[in-house]
Amino acid sequence: MDIAKVRELVELVENSKIDELEITSKDDTIRIQKSASRPVDSVISLPAAKVESAPVPVSTTVPSDAPAPPSPERAKWKELRSPIVGTFYRAPSPESPTFASIGDKVSTGQTLCIIEAMKVMNEIEAEFSGVIKEILLDDGSPVEAEAVLFLIDPS
């Protein structure tokens, strides 16, 4: 692959209105794509190319915007996660009271919320007993599988 030709193609994409260019020959494939956040940035993909990188120094300082470590009390709280993708509901209907609120004592098997998936309402039950300390989603929010729904203090 001629590097001058690759540079010429990158410049062509940068100076045109196209966002992506892919060229395949019998031995090589070149794909150049403009980045939405950095319009000048391009991506070149060569399947047989080897890339070597220099070691990156690791900083041991903690950035000021990093979250504080959890308190010892909070560290013992357990997470109740969503088993499926869907929409999170705290109550069986908009007019009904919620299944559970912050501060409520819950027991194993008690329904805490509903996850709607493909028009099926799936009741999510407590996997252990405890006190609800945090509810991490708003009513009607989309939820991914394995997303944390509740933080429960099991003591």
Image (spheres, rainbow, N blue to C red):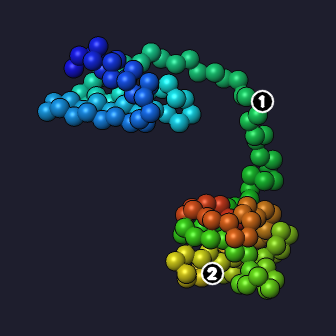
Q: Residue furthest right?
A: 103
Q: Quadrant of residue 13?
A: top left
Confirm or deny contact between disc 2 and disc 1 (CB under 8 A).
no
The residue identified by callout 2 is 123
Q: Viewer-proximal residue, 3 or 51?
A: 3
User: Residue placed at 21% from the left, 20% from the top?
Assistant: 1
Q: Is residue 33 above or below residue 73?
A: above
Place of residue 84 in the rendered image (x, y in percent of width and height, measured from the top left): 54, 69
The residue type indicated by label 2 comes to Glu
Residue 55 location (% of width, % of height): 47, 17
Q: Is residue 101 above or below residue 49?
A: below
Q: Position of residue 18 (x, y in %)?
A: 41, 35
Residue 27 showing in the rendered view? yes
Q: Element under label 2?
A: strand
Residue at image point 52% right, 77% down: 118
Q: Secondary structure at mark 1?
A: loop
* Residue 26 location, quadrant: top left
Judged left or right of residue 152, residue 25 is: left
Tag count: 2
| Disc on res. 107 | none
Residue 81 seen from this side: no
Kind of residue sitting beneath label 1: Ser
Point out which mark residue 64 bears: 1
